[in-house]
Amino acid sequence: MVVYKHLFFDLDHTLWDFDTNAKHSLTDIYAEFDLHLKVTPEFDEFYKKYLFHNEILWDRYQKGFISADELKWKRMWRTLLDFKIADELLAKNISGRFLEILPTQKEVFPHTFEILDYLLEKNYVLHLITNGFEKTQWSKLNHSGLNKYFTHVITSEASNSLKPKKEIFDYAMDKAGST
């Protein structure tokens, strides 16, 4: 019989509700940058375009076609271009502000805390493996209250490998073995 002692989780789209938190952040940014004066139709269409471009660019980043810096600002750039706004400086300013606001959001999926509490009560050692950026992911964990659940947090940036590559799993297993 196999007895599991270590459990590994992802953060975004698994525990931390990325889409809801991104929507809250972009709602604030939409108002802050007066995008309602530049973008038509309203916010919901802007948000849908952002999600579309974000997904494509994350895929390109994970495949090594673009850098992290390109991903961060080009998702906003491409979204603005869909509304005929070719303002690179605006895209970079929105991106910077987004990266400040997003990780402070606290929305997790329903029952996340109850499940994690249950697993800790059963003496599982919990680890987090995430493709996000080191500073951003730690901010998400700290603001949402998820930080207290995990023995190790392994980001793709710290391990120098994007999941689901074998290298990040090996890195995580090495970390788990040191406890």
Image (cartoon, grey):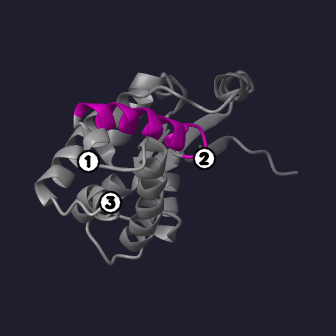
Q: Which residue is mark 3?
A: 83
Residue hosting label 2: 8
Number of other residues with Cα within 10 Å of mark 2, as a class: few under 14, some 14 to 19, many 20 or more: some
Residue type for callout 2:
Phe
Instruction: Write the residue at 67% across / 25% down.
Output: 120
Q: In this rendering, would 68 be left or right of 47?
A: left
Label 3 CA crowd tier, 10 Å (few <14, some 14–19, many 20+): some
Question: Of the residues shown, which amino acid type is indicated by label 1?
Answer: Lys
* Magenta highlight range: 13-32
Q: Is residue 106 magenta?
A: no
- Which residue is identified by label 1? 38
| Rendered position, 45 above or below 16 | below
145 and 53: which is toward the camera: 53
Q: Point out the tag, 2 or 3, that comes first from the N-terminus.
A: 2
What percent of the width, then of the height, locates residue 112? 65, 29
Whole-percent x, y for residue 108 in the image: 57, 30
Is label 2 in contact with label 3 (beta carbons under 8 Å)? Answer: no
Identified by mark 3, the residue type is: Phe
Q: Nearer the viewer, residue 55 or 112?
A: 55
Which residue is depicted at the point 38% across and 40% down? Answer: 137
- Give left or right: position of 4 versus 105: right
Residue 19 magenta-highlighted:
yes
Element carrying mark 1: loop
